[in-house]
Amino acid sequence: MTQQVSAGATGSAGLPGMRGIRLYALASAATIAVAGGLFALAWDGEARQAVLVSAAVAFVVQLLAFAVARLLAANGHGIAGWGLGAIVCLVSLVIYGFVCRAAGIPTNAGMLSLATFFFLTEIIEPPFLSI
């Protein structure tokens, strides 16, 4: 007799919450791509490259912040996790501003696009915390 074992909430990799993280990563990538496309219509040249760099930074930082928020939400501290993620984004934005200036990246395009990407991905985050 064969017994079937369901992956359930642990996902296919056996790690808790991976389905929610994968869905959030997909939604974040789509959101950042749409917003980045709109920024690309407004800027060209080096400013457009700054938008691409900002998109990559936002995606990585948000996924890391989301993973931490999921851990806190699993322990009943969802608001604390969301707040910690917002603080991580704010600190990243400040550091990125200094990096833009030091590296000669167009500051207006870089900072505005990164702040927008962070804002949009923070807005879509709450429903994914419980998946």
Image (spheres, rainbow, N blue to C red):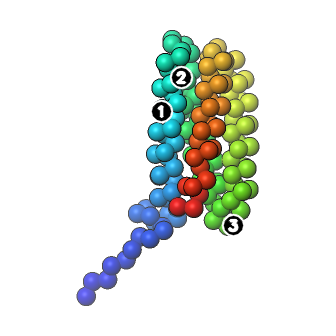
Is label 2 in a helix, a strand or a loop? helix
Is label 3 in a helix, a strand or a loop? loop
Which residue is more in the foreground, 34 or 68?
34
Q: Which residue is mark 3?
A: 76
Is label 1 in a helix, a strand or a loop? helix
Q: Which residue is mark 1?
A: 33
Q: Is residue 124 left or right of residue 12?
A: right
Question: Vertically, is 112 above or below 80?
Answer: above
Q: Which residue is mark 2?
A: 39
Instruction: Tell me the quarter of the picture where residue 74 sits.
Output: bottom right
Pick out the residue farthest to the bottom: 1
Question: Vertically, is 64 above or below 114?
Answer: below
Q: Amino acid at mark 2?
A: Phe
- Return the mark for residue 16: none
Pick out the residue farthest to the left: 1
Identify the residue shown where x is 39% and y is 74%.
Answer: 6
Q: Position of residue 24 (x, y in %)?
A: 51, 49
Q: Is residue 90 left or right of residue 120?
A: right
Kindly report the distance in space between the C-alpha atoms of the residues bearing marks 1 and 3.
32 Å
Identify the residue shown where x is 66% and y is 18%.
Answer: 108
Give the quarter of the figure containing the N terminus: bottom left
Identify the residue shown where x is 27% and y is 83%.
Answer: 2
Q: Position of residue 110 (x, y in %)?
A: 62, 22
Q: Decide: few, some or many residues near mark 3? Use Cα within 10 Å; few <14, some 14-19, many ≥20.
A: few
